[in-house]
Amino acid sequence: MAQEESIHRLSVIVPKNPFAPRPLQERKHCLCALNVEKLMEWWPGSPHDPERDRNKVRAIQRSLDWKRVVQIAAYLLQQEIIDAPNLVLKYFNEIYDPKKNEPGREWPPKIGKVSGYERSEFPTFSNVLLHVNGAKIEEIKIPNEKEEPGAAHLIFNEKSKNLNFSVIDGQHRINGAFLAVKLLQEKDSNAKWEIPAEIFLDLDKAGEPPRRQAQIFIDVNFYQKKVDRSLVADLFPTARSEREPRNLKERAQDIGRKLMLEIGPLVGMIQIPGIKYGVKDVITLATLNSAIEDVLETLNENGISSLERQTEFLAQCLSAWFEASGRFEDPRKTKEGSLNPQNVVYQGRVLVSILALIPAMIWKLRKEDINYVSDKAVKLLIKWLREVARKANLLDKGVFISKERFKEYGYLGSGGISRFRNSLWAVVDGNRRLNKRLKPETIAALADKNRGKVLKEISNN
């Protein structure tokens, strides 16, 4: 009876792979759904008969990033996880404490007490990739009926010493799902989840180096190109449909999309590199969204709170900047469809720094008692931004410096964004021009002083 209870027959689909080398055509792989708690027993957890052998698993992946594990659990649960270190210890100590002395392992792990999550209306993840020795696939044949192509059972004895589960790709998802299920069971003891899996059988012999498994891991994680961040940023508002944004990140996504498609000087120019949308050397949507998110709290605190008004104000500030720089272009109206190669004012590093000046722009408009969104505001901002650029030694005969000069000043490459931003903030107040001989540390100190003054004054008002 015990032998029968330890044998598992899982329903699977066996797809044919015509691209596999001929010698591997007979080594089957299958698609199925696995109970994550059972998988944790078969893979790193429960010892096998007849001896306790916790070294049976030789994973392709390295040590776990426990911060990522907890984040996955929080995402699946769609709630913050509080007291993460103790929860990890509670549910994983029996599994991982015996392995703590293995090279590269850290147990118990050092992680933050609270883990946030990314919101989703349907939390899930893609299939994990597993390798199994000691199992077999048995095709399903129905008498008097046509054979169901691909339908089969995966059969194995979970107590067999010859059974070896290993994870090719997905160890963080498996552990994260396991933690999420355990936390769910604190409220509902019957909770369970079957995770999607693709299982390869006997690609490498038991006890031998996992050469073919390693190649699959490389194929999945190195050769396959990740989805472009800007393409994902563009899809977020679509995924939300008509639901209102829940946080600043989602509001920034809405504004960025409007600036890309509807209003302002960047319509049709903002880049989504993954689909070759936009104009070369113009800021990407993902970078723009991040810069917008950083200033939304300031906008809200100063009465610029609706989506329409925030978008109009930012579009106005961007227009003022391009006019002030003397390098306003509309490449959509040119035969080449591209920017002047010496024009850097549309680049991400420049526009991120200009958007970081939004508090100073609000400060300037308030000092002059001018409506934030108005023709007067545009004129004032053009004049003021031109003065800022002049005092920061960024204008050459009234035009923003060339790409070559921009590079000479050290604004390209590592640390360039910070140096450029500090040069702007260092001259937002006062009439003195920035001394070219000043050290970066001195400029940074001036920038911090002016930034502090501006934020304090607009906060007090």
Image (tube, rainbow, N blue to C red):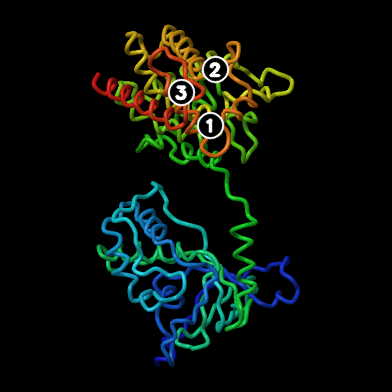
Vertical comparison of 19 with 364: above or below: below
Please identify the quarter of the rendering in which residue 357 is found: top left
Q: Is residue 220 left or right of residue 5?
A: right
Q: Is residue 62 left or right of residue 116?
A: right
Residues at marks 1 and 3, CA–CA distance in whole angstroms: 13 Å
Q: Quadrant of residue 153?
A: bottom right
In terms of secondary structure, where does tag 3 sit? helix
Task: Indicate which disc, 2 or 1, sits on the residue closer to the N terminus.
Answer: 2
Q: Which of the pair 456/209 is nearer the observer? A: 456
Q: Is residue 296 left or right of residue 219?
A: left
Residue matched to label 2 = 322
Kindly give the residue lying farthest to the front in the view shown: 437
Secondary structure found at label 1: helix
Q: Amino acid at mark 1?
A: Arg
The quarter of the displayed image where residue 223 is located: bottom right
Q: Between residues 281 and 429, which one lies in front from this camera angle?
A: 429
Q: Is residue 175 above or below residue 1?
A: above
Identify the residue position indicated by label 3 in the image.
Answer: 424
Q: Horizontal and vertical percent for residue 380?
A: 43, 9
| Residue 333: % across, % down | 68, 17
